[in-house]
Image (cartoon, grey):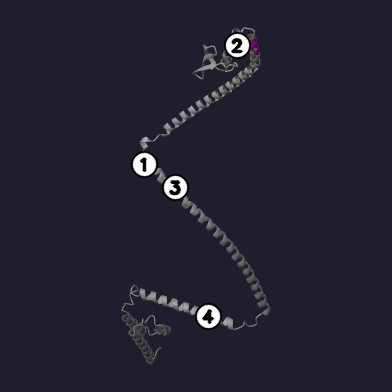
Amino acid sequence: MWSSSTFLGSRDRVKRRVNSTTMSTALGEDPLLDPTTARNTLALIKELGDRPSHSVELKSAYGSVHGTLGSQLGVDLGNPLAIEEQVQIQKEYVAKLKFRYVEQSAKEDFIKALSSAPEDADMGLLASETAAAKATLREAKVQLDATFAKHRELAEQISQEDARVARETEAAQILAKEIADMQLELARLRRDHPIADRVTQSQAEEILDNQVEQLRDLDQQLQSLSSQHTETRDALTVALTSFDKLRPEAAAKAREAAARAENGGRDMIEAEAQCAWHRSAIQLWRELFNLESVKAVSNNELWLVCWSEGESISLLIRSTADQGY
């Protein structure tokens, strides 16, 4: 059971805490964020909660504190929706306090671990652990050096690849410029040559087929002319050979005619010589060309009409003093 002095002391403490809260609020601070107010409130709640009786006095004290804080904050603390914002602020504040506590505790533990040696420490175990850690560190350094070397190699490869890409980019730009020039040239050709004047694909193919056929015919004609030329050259060679063979005989007959002339038969000898010359000339030209007609213009002249390659050729041959032509 409480005594009257105890209850009065509790009321005085509550009033002092409320007055301190009122002063903090008057100074522009949030009473729920003040650490001192929060600690005093929690202590009062715990102190009042541990006592099993006097619920009326507790409710009265709590109601006075609750009403005072609500009037100071300007909200109805009996409405959960009204105090939601204040609850969120308190949660954030508690989270910050917890973080600071954990941070400070970790700092203290770290400083203690650095400044104080472990009791009854096994130095051999620590030495072996240190050696193992050093070996691990050396392996890590070797791996790090290998990684750096690989990175340098990759950097060189990337540099070479970048140079190659730059060259290909430059070549692509040149090709793009050439393509643009070709497009301009194509546009100019289309402008200068309208579609109405152009040859269609079927017409172009027909023209090409005709030209191929003409080339084939011309090639056949060329081959035919080549063979005719070869035959004519061979015939001329044979005729010249025969003519060369007749030269000794003609010389002998000339000597014979000279002898007869000395004996008084000069006219007969000349007539025979002219006849022989006419016969040999006619025979020679008949072998060389397609002889169509022969006409004696004078005693030593012949008018020949030949037919060669579809054309008529007229020739005038004349014998000389030595029976040549």
The mark nearer the N terminus, 3 or 4, is 4
Q: Which residue is mark 2?
A: 273
Asked if residue 238 lies left or right of residue 68, the reply is right
Mark closer to the observer (4, 2): 2
For residue 268, above or below residue 216: above
Mark closer to the observer (1, 3): 1
Secondary structure under tag 3 reads helix
Q: Which residues are magenta?
A: 255-259
Q: How many neighbours does mark 1 have within 10 angstroms: few (below 14), some (14-19), or many (20 or more)?
A: few
The mark nearer the N terminus, 4 or 2, is 4
- 168 in magenta: no
Chief secondary structure of the magenta portion:
helix
Q: Nearer the viewer, residue 203 or 18?
A: 203
Q: Residue type at mark 3?
A: Ile
Residue 184 location, x and y as percent? 40, 46
Q: Residue type at mark 1?
A: Arg
Residue 129 location, x and y as percent? 65, 75
Q: Quadrant of the N terminus?
A: bottom left
Q: How many neighbours does mark 3 have within 10 angstroms: few (below 14), some (14-19), or many (20 or more)?
A: few
Res 107 label: 4
Q: Residue at x 48, y 51 (%)?
A: 172
The mark nearer the N terminus, 1 or 3, is 3
The mark nearer the N terminus, 2 or 1, is 1
Whether residue 295 can be seen here? no
Secondary structure under tag 4 reads helix
Q: Residue type at mark 2?
A: Ala
Q: Which residue is mark 3?
A: 179
Residue 175 location, x and y as percent? 47, 49
Q: Which residue is mark 1?
A: 191
Task: Tell me where residue 269 sits by quadrant.
Answer: top right
Secondary structure under tag 1 reads helix
> How much space separates mark 1 and mark 4, taking CA atoms?
85 Å
